[in-house]
């Protein structure tokens, strides 16, 4: 019999190629290439070895971790996938979608691999759709969003881990043979301990500007898993997707199971370019309204906690105006009456204004904001309930908790069962109700302060293993509905600090709260960590009283992202107030470059006792550089820093900003002009050798 011909399915972006091959020999789909752009893709077709199976199944001849595993109606535990067809949709000049249909030759099961390629951003988004037409539901145990294969001598994994107030700690290690898993099992949030992002460097470790590196992140706000497996031939398989742990899924005939998106890029020039690729993608496609400006704000959480009244808040609204900020954000504590929200033990779930603190509700606050010319925002935590609440009393079956076992609390609260449509309507109504009553509300901080433990859904009955998946899907469907009605109200994503930061949620949110830890030295590391995968427009940084550093140091650290305040402005000295007003004015002048410019990380705090980074606008006519000295050893000197991303033939003037009001110019480069060429080859002296000092330089053509 004559063997069918191989079929090549190339997908690519400006600088990346990914090539699949259908083998004429066995009809299976293989990943033949993934990496830097090839001059001639056809050469891949000449390889005799088809490559690595593109989406490994379980039950026939695969001996390694499968991307997909299922049991059929008749109890047969195997799946085989053969190529059927593929189709390319050109969405516009930048975006194309390739669908590759695979089918089991014996059972009526179809799996489509989908790839959305972003040519200019060099990003690929992959997801998978599973559908079957057996007579009864079948069970799927594994359902990866993507499976990527690599052949290199060595593999270096960079991962980010942490805990509350210590988010995004970077760790790099060499992978060895066998399996390494990074995952979370927190249910209501993607992370707290392990973050759903990674770098994978091929052969040697990658640097900021050198090395072949893949950067990946999963767009899913719940349990995730990245599984790295090195086989006996030293080939690497990376499986990414929803964590299959305790989540076997019974799929109805004719119903699609659609996985979340795995978002990845490949850079042959190190992590810096990989980050910029992801940032470009996120600014255009990944984050809600990312091309629009953001609101600077004053929050009351750190200064009042739960203890406030109308007068205190009105004063803070006036301070918002005095500082030159855009919005006042009222945090936790404004609601609940039978069990007033005066601490974190009571009131969650009862979203009526607390009449003891706010006898006239929040109406007068919204009005006051309007009168003084600032906006008004409000905190909610709509997915949660305190046992001490009317909601708990009225709807015990709306709460995730195990039968026959004691309730298990975290921050004295429980999680609502979002899989229940009645609960979905309740959560929708919290936001909708507030916006209907007070159309002046211009911002929400949406919090989620606990993970799931001892969780059980009355609504899901016999399908308890669907809980982790359906919870997140339900959350998205609420957010989808809210966004249909309120497409542009900015919302901050928060999860007891940073803990739900992912591109699944960021489709509905304009920004996220990076950590409850606002000590600026800690923050340098935390913000540095996020900067690898998320653009600074989304990273909320507030100036607070955590840490004993100077106000300038705290301000300069917050300014490298989306700046805000959570501090007692009335305690400022005259000089501190002036300094802050000036810094806010500087920020407003430069924020477009910080939010939408290209990020260059110049000196890593993981390598020196300082951190230096800069943002450059698209025209390369304007840049902002931030330099922070954390700690210094006796006699330590800091070398000049080579700038990046400038135009070599342009001449730039260096101006130090955020200077204390006594008018001293600290930086010796202040006022000088240099060519971009000089700045990138000879560099600048930035910052000082004294601990806890900082410099911000405005660099203009
Ligand atoms: C979480 C958030 C904080 C604050 C409190 C309020 O911890 O991260 O910023 O909103 O909840 O209870």
Image: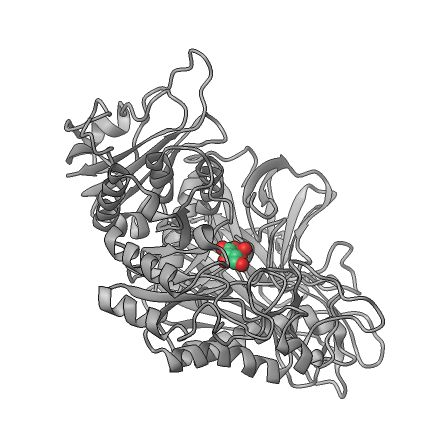
Depicted 345 relative to depicted 135: above or below: above
- Does residue 263 show up? no
Work out which residue is located at the far top of the displayed protein and give it: 635
Pick the front one: 174 or 603:
603
Depicted 84 relative to depicted 212: above or below: below
Depicted 384 relative to depicted 132: above or below: above
How far across and down, in percent of the image, does residue 145 sit? Answer: 60, 63
Q: Does residue 70 appear to the left or right of 151 in the view shown?
A: right
Q: How many marks overall?
A: 0
Quadrant position of the C terminus in the picture:
top left
How far across and down, in percent of the image, does residue 286 sit? Answer: 42, 62
Pick the front one: 665 or 16:
665
Q: Does residue 626 appear to the left or right of 541 in the view shown?
A: left
How far across and down, in percent of the image, does residue 426 sit? Answer: 55, 81
The figure's colour scheme reads: one colour
- Residue at 41 percent across and 48 percent down: it is 541
Quadrant position of the N terminus in the picture:
bottom right
Residue 425 placement: quadrant: bottom right
- Residue at 42 percent across and 56 percent down: it is 300
Pick the front one: 666 or 329:
329
- Does residue 409 show up? yes
How far across and down, in percent of the image, does residue 517 sit? Answer: 51, 45
Work out which residue is located at the far bottom of the displayed protein and give it: 135
Q: Does residue 572 appear to the left or right of 334 in the view shown?
A: left
């Amino acid at each position: 019999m004559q063997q069918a011909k191989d079929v090549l399915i190339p997908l690519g972006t400006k600088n990346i190629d990914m090539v699949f091959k259908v083998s004429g020999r066995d009809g299976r789909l293989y990943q033949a290439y993934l990496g830097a752009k090839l001059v001639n893709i056809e050469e891949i077709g000449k390889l005799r070895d088809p490559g690595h199976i593109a989406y490994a199944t379980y039950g026939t001849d695969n001996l390694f971790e499968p991307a997909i595993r299922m049991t059929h109606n008749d109890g047969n535990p195997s799946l085989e996938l053969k190529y059927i067809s593929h189709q390319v949709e050109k969405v516009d000049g930048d975006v194309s979608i390739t669908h590759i249909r695979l089918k089991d030759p014996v059972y009526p099961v179809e799996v489509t691999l989908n790839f959305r390629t972003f040519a200019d951003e060099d990003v690929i988004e992959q997801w998978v759709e599973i559908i079957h037409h057996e007579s009864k539901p079948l069970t799927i145990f594994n359902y990866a969003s993507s499976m990527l294969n690599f052949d290199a001598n060595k593999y270096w994994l960079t991962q980010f881990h942490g805990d509350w107030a210590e988010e995004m700690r970077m760790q790099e290690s060499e992978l060895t043979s066998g399996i390494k898993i990074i995952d979370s099992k927190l249910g209501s949030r993607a992370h707290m301990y392990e973050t759903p992002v990674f770098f994978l460097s091929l052969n040697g470790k990658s640097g900021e500007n050198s090395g072949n590196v893949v950067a990946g992140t999963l767009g899913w706000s719940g349990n995730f898993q990245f599984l790295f497996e090195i086989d006996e031939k030293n080939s690497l398989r990376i499986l990414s997707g929803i964590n299959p742990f305790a989540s076997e899924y019974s799929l109805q005939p004719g119903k699609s199971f659609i996985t979340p998106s795995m978002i990845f890029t490949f850079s042959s020039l190190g992590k810096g370019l990989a980050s910029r690729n992801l940032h470009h993608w996120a600014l255009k496609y990944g984050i809600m309204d990312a091309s629009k400006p953001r609101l600077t704000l004053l929050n009351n959480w750190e200064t009042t906690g739960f203890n406030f009244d109308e007068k205190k808040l009105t004063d803070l609204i006036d301070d918002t105006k005095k500082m030159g900020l855009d919005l006042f954000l009222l945090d936790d504590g404004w609601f609940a009456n039978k069990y007033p929200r005066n601490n974190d033990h009571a009131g969650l779930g009862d979203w009526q204004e607390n009449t003891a603190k706010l006898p006239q509700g929040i109406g007068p606050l919204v009005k006051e904001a309007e009168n003084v010319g600032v906006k008004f925002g409000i905190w909610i935590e709509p997915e949660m309930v305190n046992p001490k609440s009317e909601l708990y009393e009225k709807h015990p079956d709306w709460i995730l908790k195990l039968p026959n076992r004691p309730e298990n609390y975290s921050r004295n609260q429980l999680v609502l069962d979002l899989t229940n449509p009645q609960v979905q309507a309740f959560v929708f109504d919290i936001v909708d109700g507030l916006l209907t009553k007070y159309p002046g509300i211009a911002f929400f901080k949406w919090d989620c302060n606990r993970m799931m433990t001892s969780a059980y859904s009355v609504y899901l009955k016999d399908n308890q293993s669907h809980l982790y998946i359906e919870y997140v899907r339900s959350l998205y469907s609420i957010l989808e509905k809210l966004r249909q009605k309120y497409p542009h109200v900015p919302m901050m994503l928060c999860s007891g600090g940073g803990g739900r930061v992912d591109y699944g949620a960021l489709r509905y949110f304009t920004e996220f709260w990076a950590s409850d830890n606002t000590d600026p030295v800690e923050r340098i590391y935390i913000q540095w960590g996020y900067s690898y995968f998320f653009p600074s427009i989304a990273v909320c940084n507030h100036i607070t009283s955590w840490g004993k550093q100077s106000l300038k140091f705290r301000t300069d650290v917050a300014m490298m992202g989306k700046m805000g305040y959570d501090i007692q402005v009335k305690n400022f000295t005259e000089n501190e107030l002036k300094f802050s007003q000036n810094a806010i004015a500087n920020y407003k002048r430069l924020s477009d470059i910080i939010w939408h410019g290209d990020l260059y990380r110049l000196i890593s705090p993981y390598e020196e006792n300082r951190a230096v980074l800069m943002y450059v606008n698209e025209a390369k006519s304007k840049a902002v550089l931030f330099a922070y000295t954390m700690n210094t050893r006796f006699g330590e000197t800091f070398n000049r820093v080579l700038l990046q991303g400038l135009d070599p033939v342009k001449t730039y003037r260096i101006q130090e900003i955020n200077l204390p009001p006594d008018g001293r110019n600290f930086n010796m480069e202040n006022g000088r002009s240099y060519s971009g060429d000089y700045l990138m080859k000879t560099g600048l002296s930035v910052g000082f050798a004294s601990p806890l000092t900082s410099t911000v330089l405005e660099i203009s053509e």
